[in-house]
Image (spheres, helix red, strand yellow):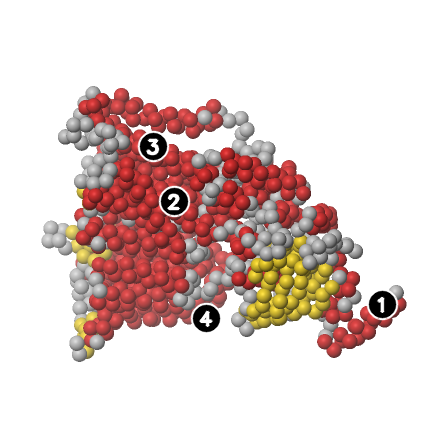
Amino acid sequence: MTTQAENTSSGLMAKAVKEGIFAGFIAFGMFLLYVGIETYQNIDNQLVWRTRWGLLAVFVVVAAIGRFLTVAFFKPMVDRRKLAKAKTGVLEISSEKSFFHKHFLKIALIALLLYPIGSVMLFGPQGSLKYVDNFGIQILIYVMLAWGLNIVVGLAGLLDLGYVAFYAVGAYSYALLSANFGLSFWVLLPLAGILAGFWGVILGFPVLRLRGDYLAIVTLAFGEIIRLILINWTDVTRGTFGISGIAKASVFGIWSFDVSSPNYFPKAMGLATSSAWYKIFLFYIILALCLITAYVTIRLRRMPIGRAWEALREDEIACRSLGINTVATKLTAFATGAMFGGFAGSFFATRQGFVSPESFVFLESAVILAIVVLGGMGSLTGIAIAAVVMVGGTELLREMEFLKLIFGPDFTPELYRMLLFGLAMIIVMLFKPRGFVGSREPTAFLKERKAVSGSFTKEGHG
Amino acid sequence: MASGTNTMNDTILKVEHLSMKFGGLMAINDLSFEAKRGDITALIGPNGAGKTTVFNCITGFYKPTMGMITMKQREGKDHLLERLSDFEITKHAKVARTFQNIRLFSGLTVLENLLVAQHNVLMKASGYTILGLLGLPAYKNAAKAAIEKATYWLEKADLVDRADDPAGDLSYGAQRRLEIARAMCTGPELLCLDEPAAGLNPKESLTLNALLRGIRDEGTSLLLIEHDMSVVMEISDHVVVLEYGQKISDGTPDHVKNDPKVIAAYLGVEDDEVEEVIAEVESEGGAH
Amino acid sequence: MEYFIQQLINGLTLGSIYGLVAIGYTMVYGIIGMINFAHGDIFMLGGFAALIVFLIATSFFAGIPVALLLLLMLVVGMLMTGLWNWTIERVAYRPLRGSFRLAPLITAIGMSIVLSNFIQVTQGPRNKPIPQLVTDVYHIGDITISLKQIIIVIITAVLLFAFWYIVNKTPLGRAQRATEQDRKMAALLGVDVDKTISITFVMGAALAAVAGCMYLMYYGVASFNDGFIPGVKAFTAAVLGGIGSLPGAVLGGLMIGLIESLWSAYFTIAYKDVATFGLLAFVLIFKPTGILGRPEVEKV
C-alpha cells in the first residue's frame, strides 16, 4: 500500500512526464520548418535550403524539459507558497520599511547625480562614454518618454499607440528650426514641447470621442501618418536621409561644445579635450528634464486636473455626472503627454546630431507603452525601474562579448536584443500583469496615506 | 407621512411634454410633471415604465426627442436642460445625480472621490492648473476648504472612518451613501437619485432615509426613482407614477396609494378589470 | 477607363489578402475583446512556411504540378500557423484572460516582436525571393488579368463562404457566437469556452496562412518584417469594417486594397499608406464603430 502523498506525487510525476512529452511534440511541429530548415542564398543568388536537425533537437528537448520541470516542480512550488500565504493570512506588505526603502528616492537621486562623475573617475573620460551615453542617457530618454506617456495611458487611461509621433514632432522641430533659423537649444527646447503639445491637441481633438481600441488604432494610424510624411516630404525633411549636423546644445549660451569655438567648455574649465564632457553635460540635461517631468506629474496628480484624469480612467460617465468636461480633460492629458514627448524629442535630436524617420517607428511607441505597463500604470518609480530593466537590459546585451566564446565567433548578441526584449515583455506580464508597482498612491488623505491595491484601480477604456 | 418643509414651495424642476423615442419604441410619451423646491419627489412605476429614461433626459445623458425641461435655480435663473450637455447640467444648472448601478471611482479613495466632485470649484481656484502648479496660497486654501466640505459629507454619510480606503473596498450600502455624498459635493440644488435603496438591507435602508431627509432639510430638493414602496411612502412628499412612458398618477403619497390606476398598474390588472378595482377600492375606502 | 478597371482588379486582389488577415483580427477581437497584435506576424509565418515548403518540394520533385505545389504550400502553412497560434494563445494569452485589459495587449505586442525577430534570427534578415509560381496572363482588351490574381480572389471567396457557413450554421459557430456574447453564461450553459477560443485562434491563423501564401505568390518575396505593415493594414481593415464583424473585415480589406491601388494610380504612390490611415481616421471620427459594426450603446 502506498500512502496518499506518494500516490499524488507519483501521479504528478506521471502527469509531468506526459505534459513534457506533449510539449516536445508541439515544439517539434512548431520549429520543424523554421528551425529545422535553414533557407539561404547560394553563390548564384538562388534561394536554397539545408537542414539543422541538431538545433531542432535542442529546441524540442528544451521545450519538453522546461514543461516537465514547470509541471513537476515549479507549479506545485508556486501553489504551495500561495497556500501558505493564504493560511497565515499575513499580507506581504510590512509596516516596518528598511532604511533603503524609506529613502529610496533620495538615494536614487544622489546616485544619479554622482553617476557620470563616478564613471569618469573609474574609466577615465573616454571610457565613461559608454556608461554615460549608452546606458545613462539612453535609459533616461526612455524614462522621460514613458513618464510622459504615463500621463496619457497611466493616469487618464487613454490608450495611445502613436506616442512616438510627438517625439518625432519634437525632434524635427528642433532639427528644422535649428538648421533653418539657427535658433539655440535653449530656445527650441520649450518651443519643441509647445509644438508637440499643439499637435497633441490637433490630433487629439477629433479622435478623443473614440473609445478604447478604436482610439488605440487611430493613434497608431496618426503615428504612422506622421512618420510617412517625414519620409516623403523630402523637400523639407530630406526623407529617409534624415537631417544631420544638428547644432549641439550650449551651456546656456555661455560656453559651447564645438572644439573650434573660442568658448569651448572643457578648455574654459581646464579639462582635456574629449567628447565625454558633452555627453556628461547632456546627461545632466536629460536628468533635469526627467526630474521636471516627475515634479510636474506629481504636482498635477494632486491638483483637480490630475484627479480628473484618474477619475476619467476609473469611470467616464461618473465624471460627466459630476460636471467634469471630459473632452477638455482628455485633451489636456493628451497635450501634456505630447509636450513631454516633444521635450524628449528635441533632446534626442541634439544628442544624436541627426534625425531620420527610422527613429520613430511604431516599435518605439510599443516599447514606450510596454515600459509604462510593465512598470505599473501611474507609478513613476515602477516605470523608472521598468525602463532601467528593459532598456538597460537590452543595452547590456551589446556588451556581452563573452557569449562569443560560448556560441562561436559568428555570434552577434545584438541580433537577439529585440527577441529577448519581446520575451521579457511577455514573461513580466504573465507574472505581474499589473506591472512592477501595482498599487496606487492616493493624492490626498484625511488620517493616513494608504496605498490603494491594484485590484481596485481600473485601466480605462478610452 | 412625511411633510416637507415647503417654505418656499415654488417649482424647481418643470418637465413639459417630454417624449423620448428609441427607434420605433416610445419610451416616454408626452410626460409633464413638476417638482417643488424643498420636496422629495418620487418617480415610481413598474419595470420598464421609463423612469430611468426620464432621469437620463433630465441629466443630459439622453437628448429627448421632444419636450422641455426647465430647471429653476434659487437665484431665479432658468436653465433649459435639454439644451445643455451632461456635464454642463451639473456644472451650471446644479443638478446632480447617482446611478442605478453604482458608479464610483473604485481605485480612488473615498476622500478622493469627494474631491473629484468639487472639480469645477477647485479648477477655478487653481487658476485652471497654472496658478496651482506654482503653489500659490489661493489654491492651497481652496484645497483645504474642499477637504473640509468632503469631511462634512463623510460625517453625514457615516463614512469618516473609511475616508482613506479605496471606494471599491466599501460595502454595498456604504458605496450607495458615498455616491450620494459625492453628488452632494458638487453643490447641487436638485439631487436625482436612481433607486437609492435597491439592494440595501433594512438597517441600511433606515440610515439612507435619514441621510436623504438631512439633505432635504439643508435645502436641496430631491427627485428619486424608487421601487421599494415603503421607502417612497416613508420619505417622499410628492409622487409621480409612470406606466409605459405615461403619467398615470400625480399627487401626495396618500393620494397615489389609493389611486386605482396605480394599483392596477402595480398588480398588473387587465384594462377591463380596472373598473372593478376602482369599485373595490372605493368600497374599501368607504368602510374605513 | 481601362486603366481604372485595371487598378480595380489589382486593388481587389490586394484587398482579398488584407481581408483574409483581417478576419483573424476580427474573430479574435470579437471573441475575447483583444487586439491580437501578433496576428500580422502569424501571417508572416504562414508566408515563410509556404516558402520553405516550396523550396523543399521543388528540390525533390522538380516537375511537381503547380496546383499540387500550391495546395501543399497552403495546407502546410495552415497547419503550421494553426499550431503556432494555438500554442501562443495557450501560453501567452490564456493565463491573462480576464485580467487587466492592457496586459494581453502588451503580451501580444511582445509576441509580435518575438515572432519577427525569431524568424530574423533563424532565417536571416535578407529578403527571400522565389521564382514566379504562376505566370499565365490573360488579356481582355487593354486589361490584363493574371492567373494568380484570379486564384487569389477565388480562394478568398471560397474561404469566406466556408467561414461564413461555419460561424452561422454549425454548432461550433454557435458556440463561438455564444462565447462572444457572454463568456460566463456560455460556460454555464455547457460551451467549452477554452476550446472554442482555441479553435477561433486556429481558424484565424489558418486564414492568415492562406493570405501569407498568396502574398508570397503575388510578390514572390518573403521577409521577416512582412508581418507589420500588412498586419497593421489588415487590422485597419477590420476596424474600418467594424471590428467583430466578419463581412465587415472583408469589406474593409477590399476598401483598403482599392484605395491603395487607386491612390497609387492617380496620385503619388508615396502617400498611399497615408491615404489608407487617413481614411481610417476619417471613417472612425464620423462612424466610430466602423462601417458594419454595431453601434456601441452607452449604458447609463
Which residue is tagged 1? B285
Q: Are marks 2 and 1 on the same chain?
A: no
The amino acid type found where label 1 is placed reads Gly
Mark 4 vs 3: CB contact within 8 A: no
The amino acid type found where label 4 is placed reads Lys
Q: Residues within 10 Å of mark 1 (few under 14, many from 20)?
A: few
Relative placement, left or right, of A146 versus B12 is left
Disc 4 from disc 2: Cα separation: 48 Å
Q: Residues within 10 Å of mark 4 (few under 14, many from 20)?
A: few
Specify whether residue A38 is in view.
Answer: no
Q: Residue at x 17, y 76 (%)?
A: C142
Disc 1 is attached to a residue of which chain? Answer: B
The amino acid type found where label 2 is placed reads Gly
Which residue is tagged 4? C169
Reply above or below: C15 against B99.
Answer: below
Disc 2 is attached to a residue of which chain? Answer: A
Disc 2 from disc 1: Cα separation: 69 Å
Residue A445 at x, y percent in the picture: 56, 36
> Which element is circle 4 on?
helix
In the image, farthest residue toward the front: B76
Residue A24 at x, y percent in the picture: 36, 47
- For residue A337, the mark is 2
- For residue A20, the mark is none
Q: Residue at x 76, y 74 (%)?
A: B274
Specify whether residue B126 is in view.
Answer: yes
The amino acid type found where label 3 is placed reads Leu
Disc 3 is attached to a residue of which chain? Answer: A
Which residue is tagged 3? A287
Disc 1 from disc 4: Cα separation: 61 Å
